[in-house]
């Protein structure tokens, strides 16, 4: 079974759109793998480097509200997939982006603003790791000698998609 979690990348802003996740000029690439070097290339945040170590080693993104807004392109989750990002945790998601994440077998987890604030504080610790238990719907964050847990909700169908590895694998198992 796929493991969810790992080092985090905190993007402390709302309304991060799909053009910032993967710029439109790369949508003509032939394979998902061709998208890999362009992850978050157009995202402008103080101190953020799309080619930096935190971006390249991240397996979980933590952000604010309305993550993935903008165009309804599958390329945004795809660029996360080929960069081994297994989950995005945010206050809320654009509806189509959220479903595209589940369809690709990745977790799109919504938490209240207070819990996102707590996760953002963990960004100060270089050893911070998030573990996500999809079955139990629980997140564990560890860093700086501290540990906290949060529960999250996900529909049974979306959970099944993620656990199966995405829509295609789910359909292969069920039909």
Image: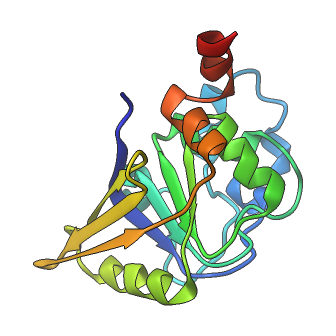
Q: Is residue 29 above or below residue 48?
A: above
Q: Is residue 140 visible?
A: yes
Residue 11 located left or right of residue 3: right
Residue 29 located left or right of residue 61: right
Measuring from the top left, give residue 144's x and y in whole percent.
Answer: 15, 79
- Asked whether 170 or 94 is in front, the reply is 170
In the rendered image, the residue lying farthest to the front is 156
Residue found 78% across the figure and 39% down from its top: 74
Measuring from the top left, give residue 127's x and y in whole percent.
Answer: 19, 67
The N terminus lies in quadrant = top left
The C terminus lies in quadrant = top right
Q: Is residue 66 above or below residue 157?
A: below
Which image quarter: residue 29? top right
Q: Is residue 165 above or below residue 21?
A: above
Which image quarter: residue 158? top right
Residue 3 located left or right of residue 45: left
Residue found 62% across the figure and 76% down from its top: 91
């Amino acid at each position: 079974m796929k493991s969810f979690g790992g080092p985090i990348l905190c993007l402390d802003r709302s309304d991060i759109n799909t053009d910032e996740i993967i710029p439109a000029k790369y949508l003509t690439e032939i394979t998902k793998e061709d998208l890999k070097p362009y992850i978050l290339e157009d995202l402008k945040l103080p101190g953020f480097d799309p080619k930096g170590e935190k971006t390249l080693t991240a397996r979980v993104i933590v952000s604010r509200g309305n993550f993935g807004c903008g165009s309804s392109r599958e390329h945004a989750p795809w660029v996360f997939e080929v960069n081994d990002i297994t989950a995005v945790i945010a206050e809320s998601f654009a509806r189509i982006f959220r479903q595209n994440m589940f369809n690709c077998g990745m977790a799109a987890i919504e938490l209240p603003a207070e819990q996102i604030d707590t996760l953002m504080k963990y960004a100060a610790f270089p050893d911070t790791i998030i573990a996500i238990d999809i079955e139990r719907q629980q997140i564990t964050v560890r860093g700086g000698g501290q540990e906290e847990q949060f529960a999250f909700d996900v529909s049974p169908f979306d959970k099944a998609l993620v656990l199966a590895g995405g829509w295609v694998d789910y359909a292969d198992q069920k039909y």
